[in-house]
Image (cartoon, grey):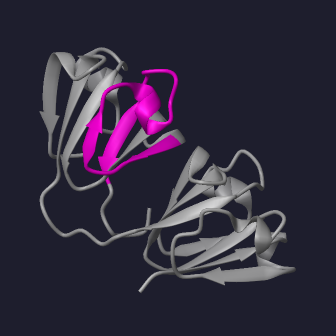
Amino acid sequence: MGKIVFYEGRNYQGRFWECNGDCTDTFNHFNCCNSIRVMGGHWVMYERPNYGGYQYIMGKGDYPEFNCWMGFNNCIRSCQMVSPYRGAYRMRTYNRPNLSGNMMEFMEDCPNTFDRFGHHNIFSSHVIEGSWVFYEHPNYRGRQFFLRPGEYRGCSDWGCFNPMVGSFRRMRHYPM
């Protein structure tokens, strides 16, 4: 079972709130978030209510300050627990919007899209099996974008306004 604890202060100090399910607006529970303990499960945190804004994907572990989860600030306003998945992973990416252009299919992680394909642009994607995470920069760094199974006809569908993806990986259940 998943559980996460949000703390207003750094190093697990100050007011805290325990959560074990999705929350569309955390503002009723805390004003700011400077540290987090993920006691179980994998979670996606969002900078804005209703699962909007910057996304931060976290696995089990301790995060004593917001830069430990690649946070840009101490603002977490909604969260979702990611359901465990043990099956195969499969995703298709396209170099044009609306699932058109050159298609490539993946079942494995890619630490550097430019090294592998000679470009960073992914304009649309179809996640067939499993969940995936796109990263803004190579080696799983920078802004994160969580993709559940489904069609993403443009990069804005996964929360991005720039089609540059530096790396991507499967959302497997181990500490990230």
Q: Is residue 138 visible?
A: no
Q: Decide which of 61, 5 is in the foreground and name it.
A: 5
Residue depicted at 37% across the width and 35% down the height: 167
Name the residue at the bottom extreme: 1
Residue depicted at 30% across the width and 62% down the height: 172
Q: Position of residue 33 (x, y in %)?
A: 77, 64
**Does residue 20 appear left or right of residue 148 in this picture?**
right
Q: Quadrant of the N terminus?
A: bottom left
Q: In the rendered image of this protein, does residue 37 appear above or below residue 123?
A: below
The region drawn magenta spans 144-170
Q: Quadrant of the C terminus?
A: bottom left
Q: Decide which of 55, 37 is in the foreground and name it.
A: 55
Q: Position of residue 19 (x, y in %)?
A: 60, 80
Residue depicted at 73% across the width and 69% down the height: 35
Residue depicted at 36% across the width and 18% down the height: 121
Q: Decide which of 10, 150 is in the foreground and name it.
A: 150
Q: In the rendered image of this protein, does residue 103 appear above or below residue 91?
A: above
Q: Is residue 89 visible?
A: yes
Q: Is residue 14 magenta?
A: no
Q: In the rendered image of this protein, does residue 26 appear above or below residue 168?
A: below
Q: Position of residue 102 (x, y in %)?
A: 16, 15
**Does residue 90 appear left or right of residue 13 in this picture?**
left
Q: Is residue 149 magenta?
A: yes
